[in-house]
Amino acid sequence: MSVPTLNELLTVRTQDEWTAIALAQLQGRNFPTTDWTSTSPERAMIETDTACLADQSIQIPLIVQLVLVQAALTGTVATDPATDALKFLAFNFYELDPYEATAAVGDLTLTCAAAAGPFTVTVGQLIAVSDDGLLYTNTTGGTLSPGGTLVLSFLCLTAGIAGNVGNGTITTMQTPLPGVTVANTPGLWSGVVHLGSGTGTVVLSATPTGSHSYSIRVDTDGDAGAATTSTSVDGGAYGSNGTTSVLTNLGGHGGTATITDSAISPSFVAGDTYTFSSPGTWLTTQGTDPESQQSLAARILARWPALSAIPTEDVYSVWAKESAPGQVTRVLVETDPAVAATVNIYIAGPSAPSTAAQINSTQTYIDARAPLTDLPVVYAASTEAITVTATATYPIGRVGGHADLDAAIVAYVTETAIGGTIECAQITALAMKLNAAGVATGAVNIIDVDVGNGVGVDKTLSGHAIPSPVVNSISWFPV
């Protein structure tokens, strides 16, 4: 008997339909059935069996639907797009809409030479080009004065995470203006997110070293120079700052945080936190690929904990993702080891840490749902630079060369879970691109895969980090 298709497994058949199938099978083997009456013993035996099949037929689709979810979690590459079958299941049984691909949006800075301009820039007038050849068009306009700068919002014309290019990688325009340069270089710091009732502010200056996330916690009430604070770097333990109002060389990573009073005293209230990261990002909205099979399956399985009166880690993960669909795609939830009832929630988008605005909106969304006994605190994930090296060969006549293989590998590494593990075997599988028959349709061979821990050794990200930036340094040779 042939293996049934998914449609066949999801089809409920009546007893009469099963009886017709059984009779057809017997007739196909030249077994005489035409002389059976409706009350004959032979007919009764057949219908007894088909009654059982009809009962099982009702259960089979339910079993298949559950298996689909489990298989989607365990039997696919993390970046494989959700199948139509899983989308159907998510929508019809769990009222979940799969996330569609969205385009990246970010701020580019136009700089005008002193002898050029002025220019009046209208919406859609300019096309900027990334180092990867992706096109971006301006969605805001303004006046660019001689010797001045103008920051405009640009939309990637290609949907997907590919548009989330790194800082400093957009430096040319397809529609040039004389004497004008363009760059996607953001500030050294992200915005500061304040959680709590205090009215004081934290002002960042000087140059940080590397990519890190920070949290300044107020331990006792007071104004600047009187309140005591502690600082945590990359989700580590808080270290006391005492009562100083100027924190330099934050956690040994450079930079200065100045604590500034407001007119209200005390300006700083115990329990308040100020979170930020370095560097900033030019992106205001991260581009997203269509939701992956694993992501949609995980959301299906997390659907039920959200109905519970008792919050679990899954519930906070669901709420975080619901707060910004497609923008908050990675969540790590931990109980604070030092502060009772505090739940630390680290979030990131598909290819970069979440922005200050996203952290604020996620915090607000969760605060409205969390029980009074919990204190949820939302943080941006930190980052860890990852370089992939290997030596690979591919068929010399292969259509597209190895570009699709590179893209799949970069996407896999980029979308690794917060604090997750990058597996060398997955990179090998993506490079080989095995088809359903197990035949390689990508690389002929790939050796010496290294993601930072040595050849063939998997890489587990530190603490609360995501991979950023991801550098693909695989050496390809046609054969």
Image (cartoon, rainbow, N blue to C red):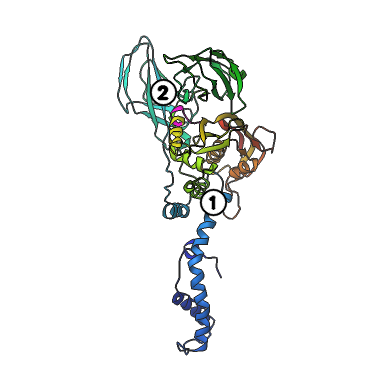
Q: Disc 2 residue type? A: Leu
Q: Earlier in the sequence, mark 2 or mark 1?
A: 1
Is 408 situated above or below 168? below
Q: Disc 1 residue type? A: Ala
Does residue 354 show up magenta in the picture?
yes
Q: Nearer the viewer, residue 169 or 223?
A: 223
**Residue occupied by mark 1:** 72
Does residue 452 show up magenta in the picture?
no
Measured as percent of width and height from the top left, residue 435 is found at 57, 52
Measured as percent of width and height from the top left, residue 342 is found at 55, 33
Badge 1 crowding class, 10 Å Cα cut-off, few under 14, some 14 to 19, many 20 or more, is many
Q: Which residue corresponds to the image point at 41% horizontal and 13% vertical from the top-left?
A: 263
The quadrant where residue 232 appears: top right
Asked which secondary structure carries label 1, the reply is helix
The quadrant where residue 454 appears: top right
| Mark 2 in CB contact with mark 1 (< 8 angstroms) | no
Q: Nearer the viewer, residue 252 or 144?
A: 252
Measured as percent of width and height from the top left, residue 234 is found at 59, 27
Asked which secondary structure carries label 2, the reply is strand
Q: CA distance from mark 2 to mark 1?
A: 39 Å
Measured as percent of width and height from the top left, residue 441 is found at 57, 48
Return the mark for residue 247. Answer: none
Q: Kindly report which numbered mark, 2 or 1, lies closer to the viewer in this rendering.
A: 1
Is 209 situated above or below 291? above
**Residue occupied by mark 2:** 108
Which stretch is magenta?
352-358
Residue 479 visible somewhere in the drawing: no
Quarter in which the N terminus is drawn: bottom right
Is 85 situated above or below 32? above
